[in-house]
Each structure stands twice: as C-alpha cells, then as structure tokens.
Amino acid sequence: MTTLTLTLFPLLICLSTVGFMDVTLANLSYDHYHNSCPHLESLVAKTLMPIFLTDPTSPSAFLRLMFHDCQVQGCDASILLDSNGESISSEMLSGRNFGIRRREAIDMVKRVVEAECPTQVSCADLIILAARESVAFAGGPRIRVPLGRRDSTTASNRRADTYIPSSTVSVDNMLRIFMSKGMTMDEAIAILGGHTLGVSHCINVVNRLYPSYESEKLGAFGIYLRLNCPTMAPLTNLTFIPNDLTPFVFDNHYYKDLKAGRGLLSIDSSISTDPRTAPIVDRFSRDSDYFFFTFSSAFVKLSTVGVPTGKQGQIRNQCSQLN
C-alpha cells in the first residue's frame, strides 16, 4: 500500500468528507441505509481491503467500472448483468468495455452485505461505494456520496456502444457529455482526472501511432509509445502503458504529464491544448487541493444523474442476474 501524506485546507477537508451537492432527488440521501443497513459503508470498506492490498491495480478497476456503468443509463449496475438470451445483452459485449475488470468483486461484496442486510442494498450503490473507497485508498479524497439507487432490469451492449465515450472523443463532445450531467467545465476536466489511476491499453492508443504518429502533439513521447505498443493491432489486455508516473496513487500527476506533453489518449492531449480547457489543466497541475475538491464534486454529480430510485428497477439478489 502506498502511503500518501496530504495537507489540505480545513475547509477542503470538511467539504471532501461531507459532500458537494444538496442532493434532493427523491429517495437518494446520505443516510438512506441508516436503519436498514447501518454498518454498510464500513462493511464494504472492510471487504474490499484485502483486494486493495493484494492487487494494486484494483482501485483503478473499480473506478473505471463505475464510470462505465454510469455513462450508459445512469449508475444502475446494468454493467454487471450477464446476457440471458432474452431481454438482456451484456454491456460487456461492447468494445467500449474492453479491459473492464472486477465485476466479480462486486458480486462478492454483495454476498457479504446480503448476509448482514438481506434484500436491502442495491448493486448500483455497491459500485459507487467501491469506487469511493478506491479513490480514498489510493490517496485521494474521501467523498461522501448519497445512496438509494435501485438496480436496472435492462442492459444493452448497443447502448454501451452509443453512450460510453471512445478514447478519441473530441473536446467538444466530451464537454457536452459531462456538462449535460450538470457539471461545470472545471468538473468535466476533473472527472477525466480519474485517469491518474491505472493504465491505458495499447488498443486505445495505436490510432495515434500508426501508420504515422501525431508528431505535432506527441513529439518524442510518440517514440516511447511506439516502443511500448509496437504493433498496430494489439488484441489483448497484455499491452498497456501506465497512465502517469504514479499509476497506483490518486494525485494530480496526470495533469502534470499533460503539461509536459505526455498525454496518452487523444482526449488527454487535446484538453491540454484547447484554449478553453488548458487553463484548467494548468491549475490542477499546480493545485492538488483544488483538483481533489473539484473531482469530488464531479463524482457526486456523475453518480446521481438519471439513476433509478424509489420503486423503479429492483434490488437484485445477485448482481449478475435479474431476480
């Protein structure tokens, strides 16, 4: 485990542990499980800790799992459903979900939670809590999140193809996607800071390298990428590059790398040069406190927009299949 000492202003500490939005969505609240499963958050954290300690890549996997779930039809655990030959076509069949891992770990957490709080806690909320714990474990802020989501009864790989942004998304489309969820421009750039954890697979980078690399954007960094991704058609998870110099730590090195011309994905390079977003990248690279604050706010917004609540959907007994 990497230990990261952080010095935050008292106000920022307060905000990062209390939450950033006055969440008024029906049936979503910060104390949703106060009576039905009072020890839920500590139970989830305790269950995930052995995974974090044995697999340093797991925090990035849980964070990416959340992002991809929330992009399709709100944070509803649709990404966990397996195809059933009828109404469910697994989102994992989408090429946009290449490299998604740790779905089975959410099932494991669900079993532990069910033993203490039967039929109370949604798989959707467990994904959010796993992502929140991942950020905190890796040295980032502890984000207080509202709970009370329900699990979807539908899933579609075609919807995943449509709604999960590709690695070649333009700055205009990226801003449209995130600002449509109520984010400010700063928050839209902050949510991309999730790239500070983990790796990028060569399959998402080769478009920048072959048949010729983007010399104006990449410069000498393109040669480094070609050495690490030597083929135009990498088809497995075995070819990858660390997202930044500290891939197991949640910090602002991602933005420092962008400033130095070391953006892996096309969108990474683009936000560092676009006149609308470059000043935000610059501020995040210099001010980790502000990045943490803004990322936390964006995280809450992403996790609450368009989610099923109340009597919508269901509380699945097993995360991978409908009741």
Image: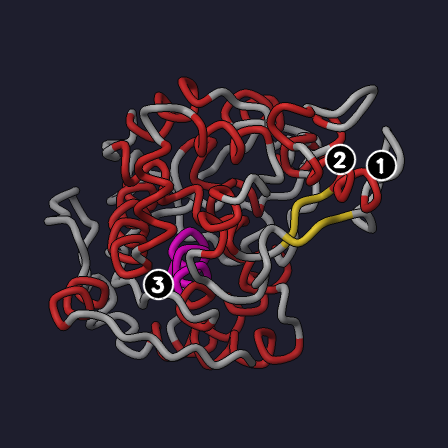
Q: Earlier in the sequence, mark 2 or mark 1?
A: 2
Foreground: 223 or 113?
223
- Foreground mark, 3 or 2, reads 2
Residue 268 position in % (x across, y down): 52, 35
Q: Amino acid at mark 2?
A: Ile
Residue 91 position in % (x across, y down): 61, 35
Rendered residue at 25%/54% (across/down): 290
Placement of 217 over or under 138, stated as above or below? above
Placement of 27 over or under 53, stated as above or below? above
Secondary structure type for disc 3? loop
Query: Can you say which quadrant of the picture contains the N terminus?
Result: bottom right
- Could you tell whether 289 is left or right of 65 in the image? left
Circle 2 packing at 10 Å, graded few (<14), some (14-19), many (20+), is some
CA distance separating discs 1 and 3 = 43 Å
Q: Bounds of the magenta span?
A: 120-132
Query: Which of the numbered marks, if any, corresponds to residue 203?
Result: 2
CA distance separating discs 3 and 2 = 40 Å
Q: Amino acid at mark 3?
A: Gln
Check if mark 2's residue and mark 1's residue have beta carbons within 8 Å. Answer: yes
Query: Which of the numbered marks, if any, corresponds to residue 120?
Result: 3
